[in-house]
Amino acid sequence: MLAWLYRHAEAVLVPSLAEGFSLPLIEALACDTPIVASDIEVHREVGEGFMTFLSPLNARVWADWLRSHSAADLQRPSRRLGPEGYASLRHHYEMDRLVQQHLDAYGSVR
């Protein structure tokens, strides 16, 4: 159900003030849904190049952005990154790779 919602959304808005890791960014990326997120460090780290950033402390900027943009204005991550960049970034965040990396890290601690 969640994947269906992401795929059918015009955009995913993530107006967070702080995040440890923003899973909605990765979920939207996986579903190739345009993303507008607050301009905070973790969002820049994860989403540089494929999303739109707005000030997290300025509600007027968000309201103005929403009034002035339509779904037709938004570019999907695959278009912003290009086919190869999009495939590479999706692979980087695939669950199998992340799980294996964690298992390797935990296995090396003794």
Image: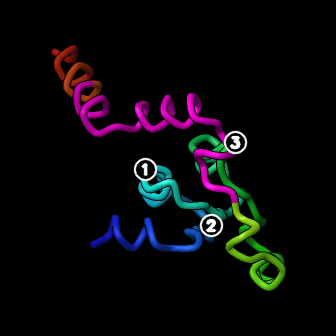
Percent x, y for residue 9? Answer: 51, 73
Give the residue type at disc 2.
Leu
Q: Would you say 16 lies left or right of 30 here?
A: right
- At 72% from the left and 58% from the top, the residue drawn is 52
Q: Which of marks 3 and 1 precedes in the sequence?
A: 1
Q: Nearer the viewer, residue 19 or 86?
A: 86
In this picture, is 16 found above or below 99? below
- Mark positioned earlier in the residue sequence (2 or 3): 2
Q: Which residue is mark 3?
A: 49
Q: CA distance from mark 1 to mark 3?
A: 15 Å
Residue at (58% x, 73% y) in the render: 10
Camera-side residue: 5 or 39?
A: 5
Front: mark 2 or 3: 3
The residue segment tinted magenta is 75-100
Viewer can see residue 56: yes
The question of residue 88 being in magenta is answered with yes
Quarter of the image where one finds residue 96: top left
Element at label 3: loop
Left or right: where 22 falls relative to 46? left
Q: Which residue is mark 2?
A: 17
- Residue 38 lies, in percent from the top left, at 68, 63
